[in-house]
Image (cartoon, rainbow, N blue to C red):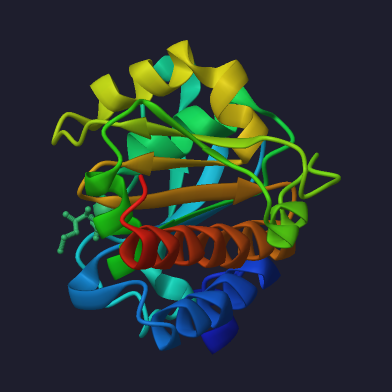
Amino acid sequence: MHHASQHVQQLNPYAIALCATARWIASRHWVPATGGNFSIRDGEHNALVTASGKDKGELSPHDLLPVSWVDGHITCPGTPSAETALHARIYQLDPAVKAVLHTHSVQATVFSRIITTDQYIFSGYEMQKAIRGQQSHEQNCPITLFANTQDIPALAELVQQQWPQVQKASALLVRGHGLYVWGQSLEEAKRHLEGWEFLIHCELERIRLTGDL
Ligand SMILES: CSC[C@@H](O)[C@@H](O)C(=O)COP(=O)(O)O
Ligand SMILES: [Zn+2]
């Protein structure tokens, strides 16, 4: 006779928090049509990553799959996000990162197509202080843009090459695709997400009203 509890997978308490954050993100309409993916660190070479193809507003902790990246090789018992290699690379590049959130908001998608440069500098917004390391609206707050590709390991390589610059934003944009943010806690990643989505939305409105790129 086995006790029922022996068959119940041990749940990481942060997995429940990530599912709640995911529902909040979906309520903001930032992950339509299964777009977006999320992860939380679960060790030096491990994270729980959302299963591929799920509605990210309807996740349960069982939809977070254990992923390992020993020797640059990713293993997982199921089918994690198609963008798992980028999550894993961000965790490898900064051991302090605890959570990675990726969204497909209308504003980040449109903004990333309007901006044709590899970097865009935000300045003059009080909200810049939502981003780690930013102390003043007068400081330059740059975000790096990458071309979209279906070759996520190749994108992860490009992100690594630009990491010192990318790291300053705790975020990056993939053109025509969406936004990635991360943080040293799930709460910080959520703040970075809301802060960047706000900044991008403001800048898009400013460009729309003034025609000034
Ligand atoms: C419906 S488009 C979304 C995908 O192509 C991808 O960009 C994405 O963010 C979600 O992929 P997933 O494999 O579910 O993590
Ligand atoms: Zn995506």
Q: Quadrant of residue 14?
A: bottom right
Of 76 and 18, which appears nearest the observer? Answer: 18
Q: Is residue 78 visible?
A: no
**Residue depicted at 76% across the width and 45% down the height:** 132
As drawn, is 15 to the left or to the right of 151?
A: right
Residue 53 against residue 74 in the figure, above or below: below
The reply, left or right, for residue 44 in relation to residue 77 is right
Quadrant in the picture for residue 21:
bottom right
Residue drawn at the location 38% of the way across and 35% of the way down? 86
Q: Position of residue 135 (x, y in %)?
A: 86, 45
Residue found at the very far left of the displayed protein? 150
Q: Residue at x 52, y 32 (%)?
A: 90
Residue 104 position in % (x across, y down)? 30, 63
Q: Is residue 164 left or right of residue 86?
A: right
Nearer the observer, 86 or 13? 86
Q: Could you tell me which residue is drawn at 68 percent across and 64 percent down?
A: 191
For the C terminus, give its image quadrant: top left
Q: Quadrant of residue 134?
A: top right
Percent coordinates x, y for residue 152 in the rendering: 25, 32
